[in-house]
């Protein structure tokens, strides 16, 4: 007997790509998650907060 389970996720992700305009190559990528997709008002509040968290990692530290 086979069983199937499904799950609904109510979170989204925000991805920021910085592209070099001359070479058209990806220079840096930041990813944030946890955006509530249920409420447009909630998304509007969360996006600036998540963007700030993402941008804390830019510029990347040199190795």
Image (spheres, rainbow, N blue to C red):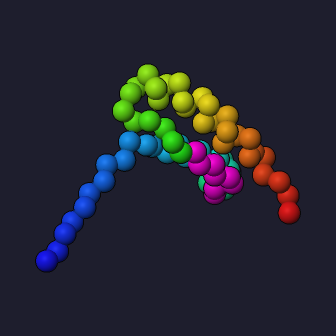
- Up/down of 57 relative to 26, above or below: above
Residue 4 visible, this orientation: yes
23 and 44: which is toward the camera: 44
Location of residue 36 by image quarter:
top left
Residue drawn at point x = 78 percent, y = 52 percent: 60
40 within the magenta span: no
Name of the residue lying farthest toward the right: 63
30 within the magenta span: yes
Q: Say left or right for 29 vs 33.
A: right
Q: Please state, as top left, top right, bottom left or bottom right, where the N terminus lies in the image.
A: bottom left
Residue 40, given in percent of the width and then of the height, sits at: 40, 26
Q: Say left or right for 11 vs 33.
A: left
Residue 29, given in percent of the width and then of the height, sits at: 63, 52
Residue drawn at point x = 67 percent, y = 34 percent: 52
Residue 18, given in percent of the width and then of the height, sits at: 64, 47
Which residues lie in the magenta part?
25-32
- Up/down of 42 relative to 29, above or below: above
Location of residue 46 by image quarter:
top right
Residue 62, given in percent of the width and then of the height, sits at: 85, 58
Q: Please state, as top left, top right, bottom left or bottom right, where the C terminus lies in the image.
A: bottom right
């Amino acid at each position: 007997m086979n069983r199937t389970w499904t799950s609904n996720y109510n979170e989204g992700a925000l991805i920021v790509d910085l592209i070099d305009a001359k070479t058209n190559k990806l220079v840096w990528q930041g990813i944030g998650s946890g955006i509530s997709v249920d409420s447009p008002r909630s998304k509007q509040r969360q996006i600036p907060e998540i963007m700030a968290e993402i941008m804390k990692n830019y510029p990347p530290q040199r190795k």
